[in-house]
Amino acid sequence: MATGKKHARMRPEQGERSRQNSSYRGVFERLSIGVPGLDEILNGGLIARRAYLLRGGPGTGKTTLGMHFLTGGAANGERCLCISLGETEAEIRANAEAIGFDLSDVHFLDLSPEPQFFTRMESYDIFSPAEVEREPITQSILGQVETLKPQRVFLDAMTQFRFLSPDAFQFRKQVLSFLHFLMEQGATVLFTSEGSESAPDDDLQFMSDGVIHLDASPERTVRVSKFRGSDFRGGSHSMHLTAQGMQVFPRLLPEMYRKEFRAESLSSGVPELDELLHGGLERGTITIISGPSGVGKSTLGLQFMKEAAGRGEHSVVYTFEEWRETLLRRCEAVSIPVRSMMERGTLSVVQIEPLHFTPDQFASMVRSAIERQKSSIVMIDSASGYRLSLRGGDLVTHLHALCKYLQNMGVAVLLANEVEAIIGEFKATEIGISYLADTIIFLRYLEIQGELRKAIGVLKKRLSDFERTMREIEITNYGIKVGRPLIELRGILTGNVEWSDEL
Amino acid sequence: MKPRASVLLVNWNQRNLELLANFLSKEGYATRTVGTLEAFDQALTAEDSIGVVLVDITGFDSSIWERCEQLRRRRRPFLVISPRQSAAIQQASLSHGARGVMFKPLMIKELIRLIQGLLEEQE
């Protein structure tokens, strides 16, 4: 059995989706589970002719995933069978069709109780259900499977068989035997369980070749805890149940992506700013542009994008706080032609609605855009907006992963970072992300002789030297103007600016 | 070859009767089913080929024991089926002539073995 996590680390060229190591692909035939994001988590899909447990509480999406599994197979011309012990065929078909699944090529074996069971008082107590019900159910399944020879079987829910077994040992033996029978007939089996603390399903987890967990609280997530013979992407991944079915957004693992790129500097198009940075910002680096509200962080980032557009390169801004239209108008007003850049396809401005996305979903959207548009600069405006707008916890870790991914893809990442203090004691960032940065550019308000002015400086630059002095910066109708080094001032970082006595 | 004696099934629950009859007929036994005391009385007087009687006391009143006494007098071996483990029911069953008491739910294999044993005694 081919195992070993070392095989999973890939460096796909040109931003292609991470592909599974050929050593895995060569050994096992893979089947798509029908949800692309989940296939990615499963390193390419389920291994064929094995049995997988799909577990989760009510409303977590087990049947929906089952429908993806079956319709995905049916679309490839595979024979697919749905065995239902709970819901009726009519209920399943109606619910599936409501979210756009075409089950016309899916065969059904409806073993749910008939209404007559209740109306005809068909209750009995002379024998246990195990003695009475198991045999006809087994015969129905055997008959259907031997006739159809299905390549995919979705069974909802295996836990029903527990009531048909006199004890745990018999249940285990029967389930194992049943799964082996299905697999011998050439089927890949996905079966559900309604495991809970009061009714644990650990035995089913041991018996299956893979375990997929669906959870609905606090956020919808999917997690794989076991996959015999294959590596898989661990941890919880965001999942959505939409009007089109299930969508899964795999957690971004930056180390799985790599693109060859020239380690060159990207000019800002403002010579004095490039002097400050000793050439500009390098591709594949993360730059934090830090400063108080309204100081010009977004404008500075868009200045780099304007210059990139001149070279025919694409950039994208994700704006979390400012309305897209406001940002566009503001940029137009300072001679950054964002609308024409957008028309020429060299700029995208994406507004992120608050609490609409999870970090995994946002990362998936960014990844898709980057790989489609080959963007060279990405600005996240702003880091605090990212934290406030996305749902879920551990947001700094997610932001870190996203930035590292972009970095590996050769993208120059600009992270606007707002600091609370307008003037006063200097802080590079207030949310503990400075460790991420290859470059930190800071913008400050200064009060000089009663006039509010702005200064720009570089605090850190890993890939080159940089100017140690600050310069005045002005954002005018004609664009960004950066002045000479402010060598005659001191105390800029404290906000209490004084003229230097040494001059 | 002498035909196999039939099994009289006495049960208030129709579904139980159906299930018992189905399982026993699959094993090759002829069965007759009764669901009321009146039908039980008729079966006791009319049927001579009964080899074994299974009496599920669930749902009947205490007059079921009178029928059990009749079975004893007619030397018809019978088993009492009880809805639960109960020493009182077991004692009453045996004192009214039952050859044994079984508690629900029954194990089919065990039931078949007991019926087979009682029929072999008859032969």
Image (cartoon, rainbow, N blue to C red):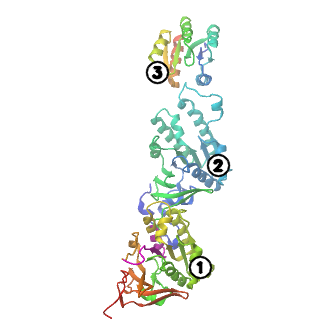
Q: Does residue A412 belong to the magenta stretch? A: yes
| Residue found farthest to the bottom | A503
Asked whether residue A336 is in view, the answer is no
Inspect the image, locate mark 3, and give the three-letter code of the amino acid beneath it. Gln
Inspect the image, locate mark 1, and give the three-letter code of the amino acid beneath it. Arg
What's the magenta region? Answer: A401-424
Q: Secondary structure at mark 3?
A: loop
Q: Does residue A248 belong to the magenta stretch? A: no
What residue appears at the point 51 percent right and 52 percent down from the top-left corner?
Answer: A216
Q: Nearer the viewer, residue A186 or A197?
A: A197
Residue A104, position as x, y percentages in the image: 69, 50
* Mark nearer the N terminus (2 vs 1): 2
Q: Nearer the viewer, residue A367 or B28?
A: A367
The relative height of residue A140 versus residue A472 in the rendered view (above or below) is above
**Of discs 1 and 3, which sits in the foreground?**
1
Asked whether residue A423 is in view, the answer is yes
Residue on which disc 3 sits: B85
Residue on which disc 2 sits: A95
Q: Secondary structure at mark 2?
A: helix
Instruction: Using the numbered discs, state the Cα–Cα distance from disc 1 to disc 3 in whole angstroms.
Output: 85 Å
Instruction: Using the numbered discs, state the Cα–Cα distance from disc 2 to disc 3 in whole angstroms.
Output: 46 Å
Q: Residues within 10 Å of mark 3 (few under 14, many from 20)?
A: few
On residue A329, the disc is: 1
| Residue found farthest to the left | A502
Chain letter of mark 1 equals A
